[in-house]
Amino acid sequence: MTPIPVTAPGRTSLPLTRDHASLIIHGKDRTGIVAAVGSVLSAHGANIVSLDQYSDNPQGGAFFQRTVFSLDSLKAVLPDIEKHLATKLAKELGLEFSVRDMSVPKRVAIFASKPDHCLLDLLWRQRRGQLPIVVSMVISNHPDSASEVRSFGIPFFHVPSAGPEKSAAEAVHLRLLRGNVDFIVLARYMQILSADFITEVAVPIINIHHSFLPAFVGAGPYIKAKERGVKLIGATAHYVTADLDEGPIIEQDVVRVTHADTIADLQRHGADVERAVLSRAVQWHSEDRVIRNDNNTIVFR
């Protein structure tokens, strides 16, 4: 299957700091990890800008660390730093790590259906410089948002997908995505991704949904919520796994509602909190602030 080259605007979000890199580390906790990181970065003349760490048990538990460092002419030196880290962290300490030039924004594909509040919010935030991403494309199973998406200068692809058999649609998705994206956002994409697709696409996928689950499943959740007299409206952003809506949670939030709120009010509150939660999840993922640990996450804010 031949990938389809996709060109999107190079505009990014937050002013991406030149000559800054992120270093993510996780593995078994032990003495000397922070010192090892400091020694490697110091040896190359790098300056540590920020450092966050967490251990779930200092007596041999799991250790997680996010470090941002700066260095003049980072692009030229980064391969040498990575080799040095591989020796010091991976070989000597048995840790997993990744290091990334933060001046290069992550490329994202957004999947959406008819509800467009999360989709348009992400595009607006990216255009306003509030998210460190490049939106490579928008893929939808409905054509409704095509003109609005293209007004942002973003490629829009309508790929119909309905019913239980989605192999044809997912084959098109894979051709569009391969080599063009670093992660995917499901901005209220009202289709279930197959386990084969999740495996084959091989990039992180972030989903957003209302936090009524596991209650009020299926169609009309806000009607059901109104009937039950809910007092909180919430949203959850999580990574997608083969287990539907059970992937590692990145962010959640709630807003209070009252008996006087109509179904339309509940839907408006729900859309507001979904937008906020999803944008935070996308930002934190894009800034390498989220470390997955089995079905859990460590989020360095």
Image: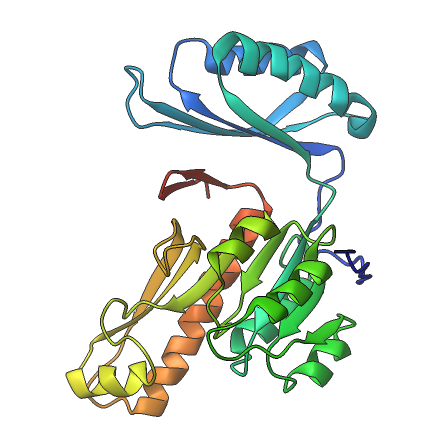
Q: Is residue 299 placed above or below 171 in the rendered structure? A: above
> Residue 298 in the image: x percent, y percent?
40, 39
Residue 147, by quadrant, is: bottom right
Q: Nearer the viewer, residue 118 or 114?
A: 114
Q: Is residue 60 placed above or below 192 in the rendered structure? A: above
> Residue 297 in the image: x percent, y percent?
39, 42
Query: Which image quarter holds the N terminus?
Result: bottom right
Identify the residue at horizontal 62%, vertical 70% (top origin). Answer: 168
Q: Nearer the viewer, residue 51 or 9?
A: 9
Identify the residue at horizontal 52%, vertical 24% (top origin). Answer: 96
Q: Spot the residue most to the left.
A: 228
Horizontal relation, residue 261 to residue 192: left or right: left
Q: Nearer the viewer, residue 285 or 14?
A: 285
> Residue 295 in the image: x percent, y percent?
35, 43
Q: Is residue 227 placed above or below 124 in the rendered structure? A: below
Q: Nearer the viewer, residue 300 or 63?
A: 63
Report whether residue 13 is seen: no
> Residue 257 in the image: x percent, y percent?
26, 79
Identify the residue at horizontal 71%, vertical 66% (top origin). Answer: 137
Report whether residue 11 is seen: yes
